[in-house]
Image: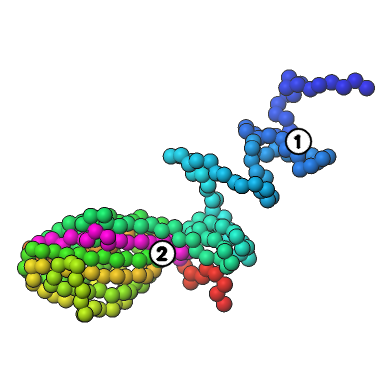
Amino acid sequence: MTRELLTGADFKGPLQLNGAAGTSGQVLTSAGSGAIPTWSPAGGFAGGTLTSNLTLAAGTTSLSPLTFQSGTLLTSATAGAAEFDGKVLYSTPASRGVSPSMMFYRLESNYVGSNVNTAQSVFGVGITLAASTVYAFEYKCAITKSAGGTSHGLGVSFGGTATVNNILYMGTNGDRTLALPTSTTTQSSIAITNTSNFSVGSTASTTTRSQWWFFSGTVSIATGGTFIPQYTLTAAPGGAYSTVAGSYFAIWPIGADGANTSVGPWA
């Protein structure tokens, strides 16, 4: 029997195995002796347990070292698993939990506001949030002024283009007719269930004044858009407040809207 070596010239069209043609960049691999070869990505990993360390390629401006595709979560969370459902990253050290992908904004220097009686941004920026997503947030802020004696109060709110299904945030606030640093024995505990302007603190007409608040809460976003921490003065005091360096706002997704957010072995 004569054996002949086949070359590329002997094939009319792409090489096919079991009716499947390979694509650009694929190579033939075999699961073992006598197994039928299959097409696999060149240099790719077809699954199994790595027997040595895994080193990811360096990221570039257009390529991340590691990308999770959006998919369905495991029916039963497996210890050591990492998952992504299109909204939230989850990890399972023992039971599945949210791996916070925290969006964070902190002032490195004071941010000067405006001497007006309309809503203004606390930080000069807002965050863009995704539709149909529930977020948790933490919010610590201090503002201070040293000019203007017109009597005024202050309210907090959230503005922007995002629409909200529901929101609850709560915490404490304080104010004093002194410059920072200062302290007070008079603080208010508040709970707020909407994004509208809500009065905090007292009314005062002193030139020097400081106010601060610490809130945490959750918000369910219906339509995606901007979400802006704001404050509104009841009157233009004659001198603008400045948001103090070190003030910050942190927010992170915890699930999809439309149902109770349940991550972990709740029963």
Query: For the residue marked with disc 1, what is the amino acid?
Result: Leu
Numbered range of the magenta stretch: 239-257
Q: Is residue 266 above or below residue 135?
A: below
Determine if residue 234 is in view.
no
13 or 121, which lies in front? 121
- Viewer-proximal residue among 36 and 31: 31
Alpha carbon separation for disc pair 1 and 2: 49 Å
Q: Measured from the top left, where is residue 34 in percent x and y?
A: 83, 40
Can you tell which quarter of the image residue 159 is in?
bottom left
Q: Between 231 and 32, which is closer to the camera in this rendering?
A: 32
Q: Secondary structure at mark 1?
A: strand
Q: Is residue 162 above or below residue 33?
A: below
Give the quarter of the image for residue 128: bottom left
**Residue 220 place in picture, x, y as percent:** 40, 66
Q: Within 10 Å of the Cα at label 2, are there few (<14), some (14-19), or many (20+) other Cα atoms?
A: many
For disc 2, the marked residue is 135
Tally of marks: 2
Q: Which residue lies at the image location 23% right of the left edge and 55% below the top edge?
A: 109
Q: Is residue 128 left or right of residue 208?
A: right
Q: Which residue is mark 1?
A: 17
What amino acid type should be assigned to the residue bearing mark 2?
Tyr
Considering the numbered disc 2 on the image, is that residue within a helix, a strand or a loop? strand
Residue 5 image offset from top left, x and y in percent:
81, 21
Sooner in the amino-acid sequence: mark 1 or mark 2: 1
The answer to whether 26 appears left or right of 250 in the picture is right
Q: Residue at x 70, y 26 (%)?
A: 13
The residue under the point 68% across, 48% down is 51
Front-most of 53 and 159? 53
